Image: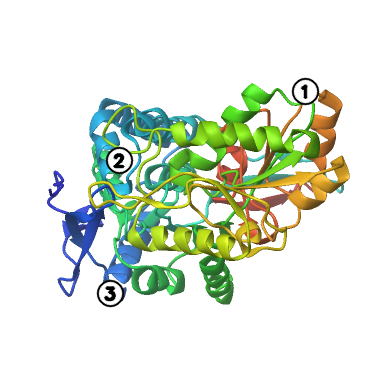
Amino acid sequence: MTTTFESGPGRLYIGGQWREAADGARTDVIDPSTGQLLTTVAEAGAADVDDAVRAARAAFDSGSWSRLSGRERGRVLHRVAQLIRENADDIAALESRDVGKPITLCHAVDVTNAANDYEYYASLAWTLDGGNRDVPMNRLAYTKRGPIGVVGAITPFNFPLILAGSKIAPALAAGNTVVHKPAEETPLSALYMAELLRKAGVPDGVHNVVTGTGPVAGEALLRNTGVDKIAFTGSTAVGRHAASVAGEGLKPVTMELGGNAAHIVFEDADIEKAVGAIIKGFVFNTGQFCMGGPRLLVARPLYDTLVGILADAVPGVPVGDPRQPETVVGPMAGERHLRKVEEYVELARKEGARIVCGGERLDLNGGFYYRPTVIADLANDSRVVQEEVFGPVLTVQPFDTEDEAVALANSTPYGLASGLQTTDLARAHRVADRLEAGIVWINDWAMLDPAVPFGGVKSSGFGREYGPEALESYTKVKSVVVSLD
């Protein structure tokens, strides 16, 4: 099956025009639910990225977007949100087929959040202003906020629609222009959104999409001297490289990187609610979720009971064809991601861990499926505990004291998300304050909203997405001081 676009099949979007890569190269996009060819898209080279950056620079310098008022930009972004909702069925179907996401979740999570992103930043575009400062010596001092310039946005394979919107919406709201390089495995919603932004009234050159590989197109975008800021979401290893390259050009960056969150269950938790949050935390998006909860820490009196409950409950989570409305867990996004999960589970077996449930591929239509897996009795220094597995795998460890729970939770290099289950209000706030993470959830998991910032500490990166904090990171401040003598 192939997917077509109003603009033609999978071309680059540069300067308001659809075109093939300069050398005519194309790359395959695979349907992860079948392992079969879905379509092909243009594979951008360095010359194509240069063209996109030049188009973005020309659009920025022309003022066709950057010099509009925040209110005018906000009206366009509101139309983007409206178009996303009007085309929700098409977008959800495209995202489901491209990524392997269950169609029900695509509607409820991906499409809804993408529309909310543009709507939220459309409203915040009205608020971009400075302020007066009280200074001595008969001076008037004030600040102004303005756009940075050309933003290079690099997004990953797991949430193509949402993580593109979380960068493009605030960047455009602030008056910047954008060159977007989506993940090579899942580029389709980025191309679809280029059409919607054009229809909404975003001027030519303000938003550009270059599909291609990280080592070629991504590297070219990082190194291009015409780019003023890099917004990156991806693995910690690639993020370190991206930050290093951006640092050579003294470009501001925001880095939302890997995660390996701990989910703590205290002895006073509501077990029924906790189990629901635990399962959601590690199977959502087939575990391909940087803010997932793959490390479960359980108070020792509850440990055996909770492991037993999971052993019974997890195999009942519906795994299968993402196009079926009852499916909760779809395939991994690709063969290499599936192999990585298999390698970690095999390592756990070699270390003597107990595979409570799962632990194997699911043979279904040739797709990249893996059964949700619970692993008990691993040492805390195991690589399976310390590293980011990025699949539907949950490790379970006991703890005896609150201090031990916090120490275990903070024991990995990551710090993107964390969470806890307790009915003790004082403990909830006390432990949340001690957890080294950019966002902490209490008595649930993955509660996200465009108004609430998220991002990492330690090896999970820096800077924030969502909230007014994200909008500020796409602006620069200018101070003006006037002598009144």
Which mark, by number, is residue 112? none
Looking at the image, how many numbered discs can be counted on the residues? 3
Q: Secondary structure at mark 3?
A: helix
Q: Secondary structure at mark 2?
A: helix
Label 3 close to label 2 by CB (< 8 Å): no
Mark 1 crowdedness (10 Å alpha carbons): few <14, some 14-19, many ≥20: some
Task: First in sequence, mark 1 or 2: give its number.
Answer: 2
Identify the element where label 1 is drawn: loop
Q: Judge depth for marks 1 and 3 and give the one in front.
A: 1
Please tell me which of labels 1 and 3 falls first in the chain: 3
Q: Out of 485 and 38, give the one closest to the viewer.
A: 38
Q: Earlier in the sequence, mark 3 or mark 2?
A: 3
Taking the image as shown, residue 177 lies to the left or right of residue 257, namely: left
Q: Position of residue 226 (x, y in %)?
A: 42, 69
Name the kind of residue labelled 2 in the image: Ser
The x and y percentages for residue 163 are 45, 46
Would residue 149 appear left or right of 88 to someone viewing this image?
right
Is any part of residue 172 visible from this angle? no
At a point 84% along the width and 31% down the height, the residue shown is: 427
Residue located beneath label 3 in the image: 47
- Is 420 rendered above or below residue 461? above
State the image coordinates of residue 141 (x, y, percent, origin top left). Answer: 73, 46
Amino acid of disc 1: Thr
Q: Residue at x 12, y 48 (%)?
A: 1
Spatial distance from mark 1 to mark 2, Cα to Cα?
A: 37 Å
Q: Nearer the viewer, mark 3 or mark 2?
A: 2
Q: Which residue is mark 1?
A: 423
Q: Is residue 27 left or right of residue 475?
A: left
The reply to whether dot 1 and dot 2 touch (C-beta < 8 Å) is no
Between 325 and 200, the one lying in front of the other is 325
The label shown at residue 96 is 2
